[in-house]
Amino acid sequence: MPISFAGIPANWRLPLFWAEVDPSKAGIWTIRQPALLVGIKTAEGIAVPDVALPIGTQAQADKQFGQGSHLANMFAAFFANNFAHEVWGLPVDEPTAGTAASGTVTVAVDPTGHEAGTIHLYIGGHHVPINIGASDTLNDINVAISAAINEDFDLPVSSVGGPTEVTLTCNWTGTSGNDIDMRDSYYGRIGSEELPTGVTITYSGSGMLSGGAGVPVFDDAITNLGERTFEYVAMPFTDSTSLLAWETEYGFSDSGRWGWMRQLYGHIFSMKRASYADMILFGETRNSGVTSIMGIELMAPSPVYEWTAAYAAKAARGLTNDPARPLQTLALNGILAAPLHERFNRMELNAIAGYGIATQEMGSEGVPMILRETTTYQLNLYGQGDDAYELVTTLATLARLLRNQKQAITSKFPRHKLANDGTRFGPGQAIVTPGIIKAELVAEYRQDEYNGLVEDTKSFKNNLLVERDPNNPNRVNVLYPPDLINQLRVFAVLAQFRLQYDRGVDSEITAGGVRLAAGGTG
C-alpha cells in the first residue's frame, strides 16, 4: 500500500467510501505574540500577585492592579501607543519592608499680592491644573493643590496640604517611586503655561520624590509564567538582581526561552534614567541580546515605568508587522521628554548607543521617538567586541524564521519514516529523505526572502547542510545558514561640490554635430 494513511486502517473491509482529512499541506503559520507588562499592584487591586492575566481595557487594569498603581499607569502608557495588541499584566506585591517615596511642593506668594491664574502642575508627567484667585492665601493655595491631586485617581501619588507646604506620597512602596517627577509649567510661555505673577514654587529632591526603598522579588512571578509565550516584556526595573532574573528566563541556556529545549523566544524592554556619564558606566555592566534598555535624561518628566511600557508597546506594534524593519522614528505617545536644553546631544547619543543603550530623541511634533533599538549585547564569551545581537531586529527576525521552519517541518512531516536519498519508494508514502527536507527548507527560505526577512537564496542553498546522523539513523542534522535582511540605518553622503565644472577637463563639447574631446580639433 504505497499511500500512507494516518487514520484509515489497512485491514478495513466494510464498503464503500471512507475519507480522512490531512491539513499538512494547507496550514499557514500563525502564532500569538502577546506583550507582558510587569509592575507593582496596590492593595486596592484584586489581582492575585505573581500570576499573569490578560487585560483588554484601562478599566480592567485599574480594577485588577489598583487605580493609580505602578502597573495600572503602565497600561495607560501601553494603550496610548498600541491599542490592538494582546497584552497581559504580571502584578507583583510591593517590596517586603519597603518604604514609599515622598516629596514636598512649597509655594511662596508675594506679600504685596499675587495675580489670579492657573498653576500648571505636572506630577510624573501628568498635568494637574489648579486655578487660584487673587485673594487666595498661601494655605488656600496649598489646600487647592492637594485637593486637585487627590481628585485625580490616576495619579501615582496622594497628597496632604498644610499651611506651609504640600506633601506627596507615592501610592506604592519601593525605589520605583523615586522616579516620579514634580514640576510646573512644562510647556512654558509658548504653551501658555506660566505661574501667576507673585507666585513661586520649589520642590524637594531637585524635583523628584525620594526615600523609596525596596525592589520586588520576581522568582515566583517568573516561575508562574510557565511555558506561555510572551514576546514583548515591559520590565521597568534595571537593578542587577531584577535584570539577572529576567535575562536568565529569556536567555540562551538550556532552560532559557531562547534555549533549544523551550524555543519560546521573546524580548525584554526597559528604561534607564541617568546622566551621560552614569549611562556609560551602566552600559558597561550589561551584556544581553534579549534585553533592550533605553536611556532617558535626568530631567524627563514621565517616569521610567511609563517610558518602558510605551517602548514595549511600539516595539510590539512594529515587530509584529515586520520583525526585520527598524523601529526608528516610531513615536512614544503620551510621554513627556526632557526640555531641549536638558537632552542628550548627538555625540552623547552616539556614544551611549555604543555601550549597549537604546536611544531616543525628540520628534518634530515634540514627542519622543525611538532612535535606535540597541540591545545591551556588546561582548562575546571571551570578552571581545561583538555586534551579533546588537539590534532588537536581529533576534526578532531570527525568531520569525525559526518559527516558520518549525511550522513547515512539524506540519508536513509529523509522522514520517526516514530514508537515504535515492531510496525507491512508492508515491504517497510517508517517507522523507535528507534531500526532500533540504528542498522544503529552500522553498521556505524563498518564501522568507519574498517576505523581506532574508536575502541571497543561492548562497543559502549552497551552504545549507541536511544529513542523517551517522550514530543515530532516526535523526536528521541540519546546518541552517540564513542571511538576515539588514536595515537602512545610515545614509552617508560625500557632497563633493564644484563652483563650476572645468569644461576643458571634465566634459566633452559638440561642435557642428560632431562630439570632440575638449581642446581637440575638427
Image (cartoon, rainbow, N blue to C red):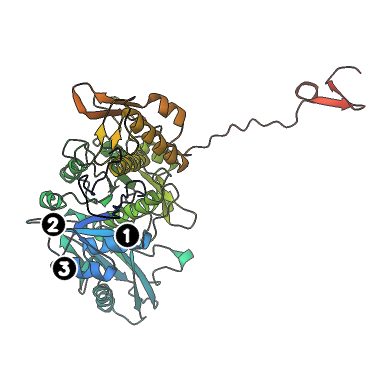
Q: Secondary structure at mark 3?
A: loop
The amino acid type of the residue labelled 2 equals: Asp
Q: Amino acid at mark 1?
A: Phe
281 w.r.t. 177: above or below: above
Q: CA distance from mark 1 to mark 2?
A: 20 Å
Q: Which residue lies under the disc numbered 2? A: 50
From the top left corner, tell me how far across and down residue 434 is, in percent: 31, 28
Q: Would you say the residues marked 1 and 2 are in contact, meaning their CB atoms lie under 8 Å apart?
A: no
The answer for how far apart the CA atoms under marks 3 and 1 are is 19 Å
Q: Residues within 10 Å of mark 2 (few under 14, many from 20)?
A: many
Mark closer to the observer (2, 3): 2
Which of the labelled discs sits on residue 78, or is there none?
1
21 and 291: which is toward the camera: 21
Callout 3 environment at 10 Å: few (<14), some (14 to 19), or many (20+)? some
Say whether disc 1 or disc 2 marks the residue closer to the N-terminus.
2
Amino acid type shown at disc 3: Gly
Mark 1, other Cα within 10 Å: few <14 / some 14–19 / many ≥20: many
Q: Quadrant of residue 410?
A: top left
Residue 489: x percent and y percent?
47, 39
Q: Residue at x 32, y 46 (%)?
A: 24
Q: Residue 45: which numbered mark, if any?
A: 3
Which comes sooner in the sequence, label 3 or label 1? 3
Whether 379 is drawn above or below 339: the answer is: above
Residue at image coords 59%, 31% = 494
Furthest-top residue in view?
521
The first of marks 2 and 3 along the sequence is: 3
Q: Quadrant of the C terminus?
A: top right
